[in-house]
Every structure is written in structure tokens, then in C-alpha cells.
Image: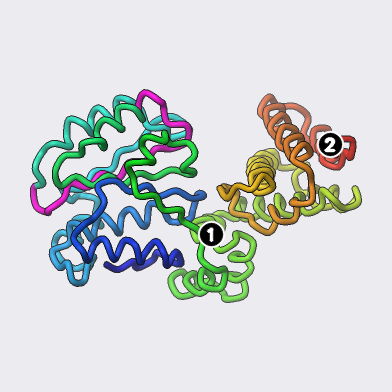
Amino acid sequence: MKFPGFLGNAPVKEALIRAFSAGRFPHTLLFHGEKGVGKRTLAALTAKALVCRDPANAPCGVCPSCIRAKAGSHPDIRTIRGSGASGALSVEAVGRMLEDAYRMPEEAAYNVYIVHLGTGAQPAAQNKLLKLIEEPPQGAVFILLCPTAEGVLPTIRSRAQIFALHPPEPEEAAQWLCEHKGTDPEKALELARLCGGNLGRMQEELEDGAAAQAMRLACEMAAAVRGPGHGLLKAAAPLQRDRALFRETLERLELIFRDAWVQRSGGGSQLSGAPQAVEALQNLSLRRLTALGELTDGLRQKLDRNANTALLLTCYCAGLQDKGIK
């Protein structure tokens, strides 16, 4: 079993290779990790390997099954998505999967279902999914994707083989970007360090200049929280005349403060893709980190209500450096 385009995560790859080679593949996998870490890439590669006609080289990439899988048209691979802004899995989506799951595969030995749980999947939907994976149909493999395993019912987690995915080393991610996207090595390494090796975020920010600027400003502002006030004001200055950039920067800051809180609490789930910024906040108390997250969320809501941008930015910078909460 091979993993072209999926970097790092050697223990995950080794476990999947052993299961595939032994012919005892788990009926339910759970891949979780921050946005851009490669959950969809690994799920697609796993599904392709399971339907590949050349098991010794799976996924070979050249057999008819691999070609169909890459095109999204293989009859034995289904992608189940949620709905709404959060992409949360719905009861209706699970119901449709339940109706389909007991059919015999058309070409391969497996029916593979890539299930996007999203964030905050409905309890009713998860309970319905549980009934399906408790006694899975013969030949069915369910690959569940979500940002963090904590949001999945314990009863589902107990029946799945769980893999936490992490970004590769920044140097490896930068090299991939140079080889496959023709990115300048210096720029690729800068992006890799900024995003902590998160290849998805690196590509997103490479293609979207505004996204890259928002990430850079969020990291600079997070680092300036503990410094003198003029440093924070200088970092935040580009936001004063760009409401869209201001909002995107706030969204990234909110994730950074959230991740800092989780790490300070001893947890490992990260969503921001900015490990250096998170690490720089580790000397702040949980109470202060909570206050920073709430301040950022409240300001974002005010920005959405078209409040004065300059005034909001001034108040926000003052709030970020309020030392009243230790």
C-alpha cells in the first residue's frame, strides 16, 4: 500500500500497510486532525487501494479501478457529506448510506464509504451511524473524517481504529511544494514554518494572497499580545482599511487562542495550523486565554454588524493587552 502525496505520519502508514497486507482491514477507520493535514487525501488513497486491481502495488494509479477512483466515478466508493456551514453529518445522509451499504460491490471486494462528520455532527445522526458500524455489512469499509475525535460518540470511537494525523516536518512540506507547485524554495520554507508544515494550509495560502496575509497578521498579533502596545498596533495596522482581511484574521486568531487553551490544558487537538503562535502563548493562564477567545469572537460578531472598523480595531488591541485577567 502506497501513499503518494500524503507526507509524514509514518506510524499511521505502517499500521495501514500491515492491515492491508494481512488482508484484515478494519471495517471502520477514524482519521482526525486539523484542517489541511491530509484527512481527505489519506481517505482517497485508502479507498483507491481497496478497489485497486493490483494489490501488490496498490494504489497502482493506472488500472481502470484506480482511474475511476481518481475521477470520482468508481461504483464501489461513496462520499457522504453533511450539510450547513459546519458540514455536520445529518440523519438523512446516514439514512441514504444505510440504504446503500447492504448492496454487493459491483467491481471490487469492498464497498468504501468516506464519511465527512464535520464539526458538531448531530447526536441522532451519530447514533444512526453507530447502528450501521456495530454490525457492518460484509465487505463494507467506513472511513470517518473529522477535525477532532472528541466530538465523536465514545461508542463509535470504541468500534473504530483511530488515527490522529499530524503535519509533516516543515522542511518536507516545503520540498513537496517546490517539486509539485514550482514554488521558490525560500518562499516555500517560509510558508511551511508559518503553517507548521500543514500542507493544505500552505497551498491555500499560496493560491490566496489574502489568506496568507491573514495568517501572517494573526501570528504577528498573537506574538505581540505579551509585548508593548505599539508592537500590537503596528502588526494590526493593515486591518484598519480592509474589513474582509480583518474578519479573516479574527477567525484565525480565534483558532490560535483556542489551540493555546487546549495545549495549556494538556490536550493535543490543534485546528489553527499555527503551532509557533500557539506555543508563544503558553505562559498565559487558561483564564486569560479564555478571555482572549471570547473577546475575539465578540469582536467578529460586531464586525459582521458593520460597526466602525477603526474603532473596533483600537478597542480590540486594547482588550488583547488588558492585563486585568491573569
The range drawn in magenta is 106-125
Q: Position of residue 181 (x, y in %)?
A: 46, 69
Secondary element at image label 2 = helix
Mark 2 neighbour density, 10 Å: few (under 14) some (14–19) many (20 or more): some
* Left or right: 138 in relation to 145: left
Mark 1 Cα-neighbour bin, 10 Å: few <14, some 14–19, many ≥20: many
Q: Nearer the viewer, residue 54 or 244?
A: 54
The residue at which mark 1 appears reads as 198
The answer to whether residue 226 is magenta is no
Is residue 104 visible in the rendered image? The answer is yes
Which amino acid, by three-letter code, is at mark 1? Asn
The three-letter code of the residue at mark 2 reads Gly
Q: Circle 1 sits in a helix, a strand or a loop, which is it?
A: loop
The answer to whether one can see residue 245 in this image is: no
The residue sitting at 27% across, 67% down in the picture is 1
Identify the disc placed on residue 319. 2
Q: Residue at x 35, y 66 (%)?
A: 14
